[in-house]
Amino acid sequence: MSVARRLDLTSETFTFVLSGGIFRAIPWLRQELERRLPLTAPRSVTKLLEAEPAVGAVRLALQEARGGASIPVYKSS
């Protein structure tokens, strides 16, 4: 939620991706995040990451190497 605020996404539509086995092992944790995130970012949706996190990192690195990565910029506080 802090990241959504720092990226100024709270009024935007975006997907909040949960990565890590903890969200599969402890279902109430995922449910609690699904309940709380809309309080900060009403247009957001939550989903579990289906691929390994490294897959996304490699894809982003390849996009950046080709000059086409779109990396959000944090607002400084």
Image (cartoon, grey):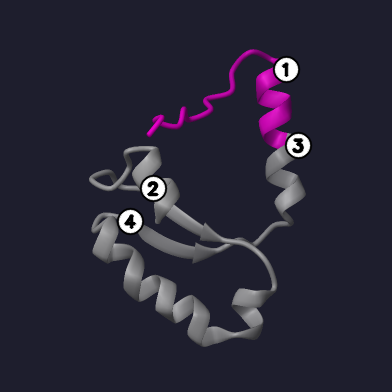
Circle 3 is placed at which residue position? 58
Graded by Cα atoms within 10 Å as few (under 14), some (14 to 19) or many (20 or more), the crowding at tag 4 reads some
Sequence-earlier tag: 1 or 2:
2
Give the dominant element type of the magenta stretch: helix, strand or loop: loop
From what the image shows, is residue 66 above or below residue 7? above
Circle 1 is placed at which residue position? 65
Cβ atoms under marks 4 and 2 closer than 8 Å: yes
Which image quadrant is residue 33 in? bottom left
Q: Secondary structure at mark 3?
A: helix
Circle 2 is placed at which residue position? 4
Sequence-earlier tag: 3 or 1:
3
Question: From mark 3 to mark 2, how far is it between C-alphas?
Answer: 23 Å
Across and down, in percent, residue 76 comes to 41, 30
x 70%, y 35%: residue: 59
Across and down, in percent, residue 27 comes to 54, 85
x 39%, y 72%: residue: 34
Q: Secondary structure at mark 4?
A: loop
x 49%, y 76%: residue: 30
Which image quadrant is residue 36 in? bottom left
From what the image shows, is residue 25 above or below residue 5? below
Circle 4 is placed at which residue position? 44
Graded by Cα atoms within 10 Å as few (under 14), some (14 to 19) or many (20 or more), the crowding at tag 1 reads few
Magenta span covers which residues?
59-77
